[in-house]
Image (cartoon, grey):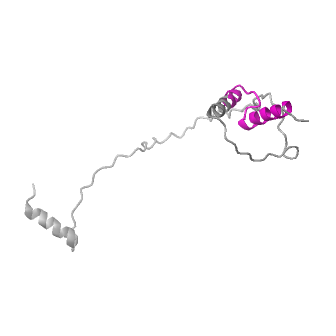
Amino acid sequence: MGSALDSSAALDFIKKGPTTPEEVPKVPEVPVATNEAPAPAPKSEEKEPAPPPIAEAPVPESKPVLHETPRPTPDDDPLVNVNFRLPTSVAQGLLRASMERKLAKDAPYTQQDITAAALRAWLKKNKSS
């Protein structure tokens, strides 16, 4: 292997850098593997006829059927932001009910719509006249 003299020469080379082209170390070339496919063989002059294009049948758009009462439009009943805290069990129950109703395609299924329906029912029941 190398000696201390070799490492001091290497250290000098690193500090100075090469001054002539002969001093530049040669790096051996290593073949590089590529992921490219080999070039296809040349085709003969005879060409096969292209298959006729396949006609795509129109696919009818199907929308999930939701048993939903229509949501009020902004003109009918505009939405407002309301912030309040709920017990963890109520929030988790609301989330679970929302997910299960959405999977069953049963409206109302958003947390907002479920909460609005529940509050409307409570307000109707507890209306003070």
> Above or below — where is 84 with respect to 25?
above
46 and 89: which is toward the camera: 89
Position of 92 relative to 7 (above/below): above
Coordinates of residue 105 in the picture (x, y in percent):
73, 27
Queried whether the magenta region covers residue 24, the answer comes back as no
Residue 122: image location, x then y, percent: 81, 32
Q: Give the extent of the magenta segment.
A: 97-125
Residue at point 13% right, 67% down? 9
Q: Nearer the viewer, residue 126 or 55?
A: 126
Q: Position of residue 70 (x, y in %)?
A: 84, 35
Q: Residue at x 74, y 45 (%)?
A: 82
**Chief secondary structure of the magenta span?**
helix
Q: Quadrant of residue 18?
A: bottom left
Give the farthest residue toward the front. Answer: 129
Question: Number of marks in the image?
Answer: 0
66 left or right of 84?
right
> Closest to the observer: 65 or 102?
102
- Give 76 or 46, whichever is nearer the viewer: 76
Q: Determine if the magenta segment contains residue 112.
A: yes
Res 95 → quadrant: top right
Instruction: Locate residue 49 relative to residue 59 in the image: left or right.
Output: left
Q: Quadrant of residue 53?
A: top right
